[in-house]
Image (cartoon, grey):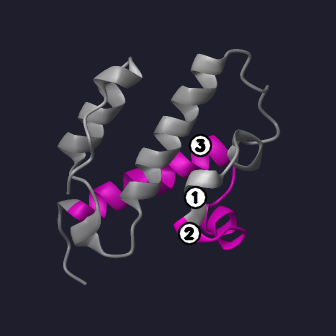
């Protein structure tokens, strides 16, 4: 294994998924088909110990962060976004302002 910036991206994705889900991402991903993560509901990914989001905008924000985190843990490091792209994605408040994650 060669240590690159993409290792940091992977680590960020793991920490983000652990924070959202309250468990190691391997536990989360083992229960779902990796290619169908877009059909995942908020109830399936958010830590049950946390209060459920009360607004639709908060739900959308959590799902946006979840999708960015999933992109960070792709198996092929070349397919992962850069931390600059991750930062840009997470800095956008309005979904209309979202940059596309190009790797």
Which residue is rendered at x = 27% and y = 71% of the image? 77
Kindly report the distance in space between the C-alpha atoms of the residues bearing marks 3 and 2.
Answer: 19 Å
- Residue 83: give x, y in percent of width and height: 23, 46
Is residue 30 in the magenta section? Answer: yes
Kindly report the distance in space between the C-alpha atoms of the residues bearing marks 1 and 2.
Answer: 6 Å
Give the camera-side residue of 99 and 18: 99
**Relative to 82, 34 lies left or right:** right
The span shown in magenta is 6-35
**Relative to 61, 72 lies left or right:** left
Q: In the rendered structure, which disc, 1 or 3, sits on the residue that comes first in sequence?
A: 3
Location of the N terminus by quadrant is bottom left
The residue at which mark 1 appears reads as 37
Q: Nearer the viewer, mark 3 or mark 2?
A: 2
The residue at which mark 3 appears reads as 19
**Circles 1 and 3: CB atoms closer than 8 Å:** no
Q: Quadrant of residue 58?
A: top right
For label 3, count other residues whose C-alpha is less than 10 Å away and answer few (under 14), some (14-19) or many (20+): some
**Circles 1 and 2: CB atoms closer than 8 Å:** yes
The residue at which mark 2 appears reads as 34
Q: Is residue 81 above or below residue 58?
A: below
């Amino acid at each position: 294994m060669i240590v690159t910036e993409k290792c940091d991206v992977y680590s960020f994705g793991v920490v983000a998924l652990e924070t959202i889900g309250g468990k190691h991402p391997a536990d989360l991903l083992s229960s779902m088909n990796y290619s169908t993560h877009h059909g995942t509901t908020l109830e399936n990914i958010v830590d049950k110990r946390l209060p459920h989001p009360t607004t639709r905008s908060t739900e959308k924000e959590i799902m946006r962060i979840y999708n960015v985190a999933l992109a960070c843990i792709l198996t092929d490091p070349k397919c992962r976004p850069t931390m600059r792209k991750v930062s840009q994605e997470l800095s956008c408040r309005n979904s209309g302002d979202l940059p596309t994650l190009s790797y």
